[in-house]
Image (tube, rainbow, N blue to C red):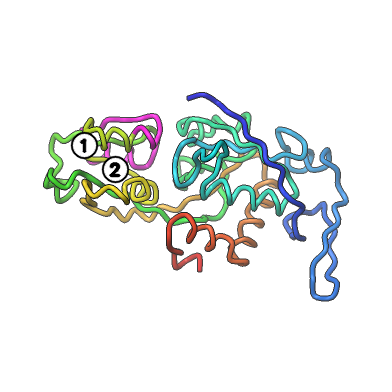
């Protein structure tokens, strides 16, 4: 996958307790913020790859989380990242990376933050530090209606498309399915549409979004794995993790997380209302 860079300058943020380098005063019922640190101070505190910029690794395309539209990178993760960066008074640089590099933590050698629909797992927690969850996301099995599948157990020798290095791929392999792996979610979905695989298995937010308008396909089985998505930083970046996590919690309290869920998924999960 080619690597592309996209920079968007975040607007000045409201006051947030996540920044130890900001001073805050409440005047007449409104908050005002005064930064007392420079880009160099922020880099020192958060150990940023580039001073004053939050460099984010994301696997593109992976709608509705991250994808290109009208020449710009957008999606649920991307809008949430910009909202976090606004809280931290940082610019944003989004770097296209393979999900394999992201989930292994390898991408964090060149990025400050991994934000790419990453399910929080014990294995991944051993190589990077996660924020609190910002979305719940179980797995789902989808196939053509005319195939007559009724469950995972009934797939037998059917070819099942998955995305490499994902929890869907891990689950399908554990179930002994005849797995066909694809580098990204877009290729996985296209393989199903083209008839190159008999079914596809992955996170429901992505697959249901991609196939919602195609009546050739149906949900064969929903797989409640209890997965939750989080953003992640390098294990050594404790201050950055604390700041990003605080920003996410503020955005959740303010209703921004719910707003973005409604915008991109058409509903708000109960835990985030």
In the displayed structure image, the side of residue 200 where residue 17 appears, left or right: right
In the displayed structure image, the side of residue 195 where residue 4 appears, left or right: right
User: Spatial distance from mark 1 to mark 2, Cα to Cα?
Assistant: 10 Å
Q: Are marks 1 and 2 in contact (CB under 8 Å)?
A: yes
> Between 116 and 9, which is closer to the camera in this rendering?
9
Depicted 269 relative to depicted 217: above or below: below
Residue located beneath label 1 in the image? 177
Residue 176 magenta: yes
In the displayed structure image, the side of residue 268 where residue 109 appears, left or right: right
Earlier in the chain: of badge 1 and badge 2, it is 1
Residue 16 lies in what quarter of the image?
Answer: bottom right
Q: Which stretch appears magenta?
A: 166-187
Depicted 252 relative to depicted 181: above or below: below
Residue 58 magenta: no
Q: Mark 2: give few (<14), some (14-19) or many (20+) Cα within 10 Å.
A: many
Residue located beneath label 2 in the image? 201
Q: In x, y percent, where is residue 75?
A: 51, 47
In the displayed structure image, the side of residue 152 where residue 162 appears, left or right: right
Q: Secondary structure at mark 1?
A: loop
Q: In x, y percent, where is residue 120?
A: 47, 48
């Amino acid at each position: 996958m080619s690597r592309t860079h996209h920079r968007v300058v975040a607007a000045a943020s409201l006051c947030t307790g996540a920044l130890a380098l900001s001073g805050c005063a409440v005047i007449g019922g409104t908050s005002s913020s005064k930064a007392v640190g420079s880009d160099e101070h922020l880099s020192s505190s958060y150990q940023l790859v580039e001073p004053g910029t939050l460099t984010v690794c994301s696997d593109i395309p992976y709608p509705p989380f991250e994808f290109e539209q009208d020449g710009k990178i957008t999606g649920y993760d991307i809008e949430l990242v910009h909202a976090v960066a606004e809280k931290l008074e940082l610019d944003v640089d989004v770097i296209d990376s393979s999900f394999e590099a992201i989930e292994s933590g390898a991408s964090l050698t060149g990025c400050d933050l991994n934000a790419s629909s990453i399910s929080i797992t014990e294995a991944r927690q051993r190589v990077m530090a996660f924020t609190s969850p910002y979305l719940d996301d179980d797995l789902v099995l989808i196939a053509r209606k005319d195939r007559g599948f009724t469950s995972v157990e009934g797939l037998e020798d059917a070819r099942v498309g998955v995305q490499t290095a994902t929890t869907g791929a891990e689950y399908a392999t554990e179930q002994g399915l005849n797995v066909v792996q694809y580098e990204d979610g877009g290729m996985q979905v296209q393989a199903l549409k083209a008839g190159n695989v008999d079914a596809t298995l992955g996170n429901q937010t992505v697959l249901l979004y991609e196939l919602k308008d195609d009546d050739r396909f149906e949900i064969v089985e929903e797989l409640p794995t209890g997965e939750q998505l989080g953003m992640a930083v390098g294990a050594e970046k404790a201050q950055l993790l604390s700041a990003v996590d605080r920003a996410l919690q503020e955005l959740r309290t303010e209703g921004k997380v719910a707003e973005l869920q409604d915008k991109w998924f058409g509903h708000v999960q109960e835990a985030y209302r």
